[in-house]
Image (cartoon, coloured by chain):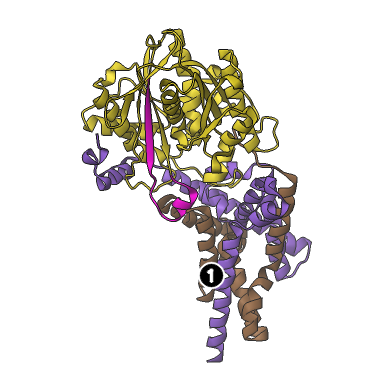
Amino acid sequence: MNYINAFLVGGAICLVGQILLSKTRMTPARILVLFVTAGVVLTAIGLYEPLVEFGGAGAEVPLTGFGYSLAKGAFKGVDESGILGALSGGVMGTAGGIAAAVIFGYLVALIFSPKTKK
Amino acid sequence: MDINRVLDKKNYQKYVKKNMPKSKFLKECAMAFLVGGLICTLGEALDDFAEYTLFLDEAGIGTFRSAVLIFLGAFFTGIGIYDVLGRYAGAGSIVPITGFANSIVSPALEYKWEGYILGVGAKLFTIAGPVLVYGISASVIAGIVYYIIGVL
Amino acid sequence: MGTRVGQKTVRFDKMPIILSTAAVAGNAEKTGPYGSTFDIVFDDDLWGEKTYELAERKMLIKAIETAMAKAGLKPDDISYLLGGDLLNQIISAGFAARQLGIPFFGLYGACSTMAESLMLGAMIVDGGFAKYAACATSSHFATAERQFRNPLELGTPKTPTSQNTVTASGAAILSSTGDSTYPAVTYATTGRVIDMGINDVNNMGAAMAPAAAETIISHLEETGRKAGFYDHIVTGDLGTFGSELMLRIASDAGYDMTANHLDCGVLIYQGNELMHCGGSGCGCSASMLCGHFINSMNQGTIKRILFVATGVLHSPTSALQGESIPAIAHAVSLEMGCGS
């Protein structure tokens, strides 16, 4: 059941992205920025948490989920250490993902070369 | 001959918009839903693996899932498969965190011939940079607002 | 000496001839319907070089060298090399000229460069300033893609109006003397920069169609020729949608070219659906002209063509700053049986 929920929620979030991509000709960079920011905002106003509870990874894997982790981290930071936690909390909550992206990105770029496709 | 005498700019733009070949919207949406959904399902499976096999806590599960998906996104970009997937899946492979990894690796790969500092190092953040700038800024603002509401 | 016959058109009275041509192309072009018309083809887009930029330069040098070899000429015999490409500061052409050591005019007309170089080369030769001039241009999918669009490995879908930058190069040697068995450059019509406010960088055909229509119609008006005078009116890289638009604009203005219009961008990948609207890039029209069309003229299957290379003059910077896409088209008339 969890898998079906994840599939449905994840698919639906990607569908929203596709509608933007097809109808507004937004570039992937803009879509990624929009989704991460939307994730923060939706989490802040309490709309994203229920989606995560229902969809699990389906809500956490799309970039809105990255925004969700950032916002949740910031709130946790504030709860634990006040106003300064707003600065440190977001990155702390997502540090693993960011570091993974940097190191894997760097290693892959070292090993492989770009290719043209047929 | 002066083209501007026979062709009105506004009318031409309208004509182009109306008659240009359109993408197959429903097919694109179906592909995005399917591929996006499948990547998320894989994420759910990773969650289960982290929870029941590795016995990680909640934060650990999230980090494990993100790291593995980012690795897969980066790896499939490196071997030249992710862009082929993106051609068909559209947002289905852009929006998941694997797409974020793709957006980090692809410019870094592309510019490796320009050197390891200003090529790979700098271009790694071509698309990831803006994502982090807006994501982190939004989270700081959200945190401050949360703090103020808490104080009041 | 040449004569001006209209606002945009000149006639070459000595009629410089195209002594030889050569075309070099990559894999996607090789497997297309005109694959056999290229002199040199290669499979791997790096072509044994370290970077795609070096591969593009190699294509350009090979095209010029092959054209010279066919004419039995050495770099020292050529008075001028006129050429350009799509890369910043036209590095393919500049670095090729460094290696060849021929006095060099660097041109940037984007995908219109082949016609621009032929036109200027013909003026130089007709004006008596050179016995031989080389005109050449190139484009490479991978180098153009990174400069104008996205990294190769970024997973982003193409839009249906997009065109694929052709990996190819073409070179032509112009000569002041030669008999009527060679194709001659008889007229040249220089295009104006036209901007109809199209700002979709994935829809170049729509940006270029009005420029192509204006140049072709101006050419016909100023030379007093009918569209049917030419076996083919060959546009550079309007693509399928751009060609449709150009034919429609022309027919609205009273010129019917449906019977003899061809577009190199449509032809080069014909039948390959992955290429959407077709090919684009300097090398598209250059390789089709220097391969298929000049070959057909030399074999006598076609006698007269109007070669109209089309280009867009925007940059990634101008696009990011929200500017629309200016376009240009240059026409040169190539005819058999005219050389002096």
The shade of chain A is: brown
Q: Is residue B21 above or below residue C330?
A: below
The residues colored magenta run C314-333
Indicate left or right for C115 with B82 as reference. Answer: left
Q: Nearer the viewer, residue C125 or B121?
A: C125
Residue C61 placement (x, y as % from top left): 61, 27
- Please report, as a chain letter, where disc 1 is located: A
| Residue at the spot of label 1 | A48
Q: Is residue C185 left or right of residue B85?
A: left
Q: Find chain C in the image and tell me its colour.
A: yellow
Which of the 4 image quarters holds residue C245?
A: top left
Q: Position of residue B24 (x, y in %)?
A: 42, 42
Q: Is residue B107 left or right of residue C280?
A: right
Q: Who's the residue at 57% across and 23% down the image?
A: C64
Q: Quadrant of the N terminus of chain B?
A: top left
Q: Position of residue C303 (x, y in %)?
A: 38, 12
User: Colour in which chain B is shown?
Assistant: purple
Q: Nearer the viewer, residue C3 or A101?
A: C3
The amino acid at mark 1 is: Tyr
- Please say whether residue C72 is visible from this viewpoint: yes
Q: Is residue C332 magenta?
A: yes
Residue A95 in the image: state x and y as whole percent: 69, 68
Question: Would you say residue B136 sits in the magenta stretch?
Answer: no
Q: Residue at x 64, y 33 (%)?
A: C55
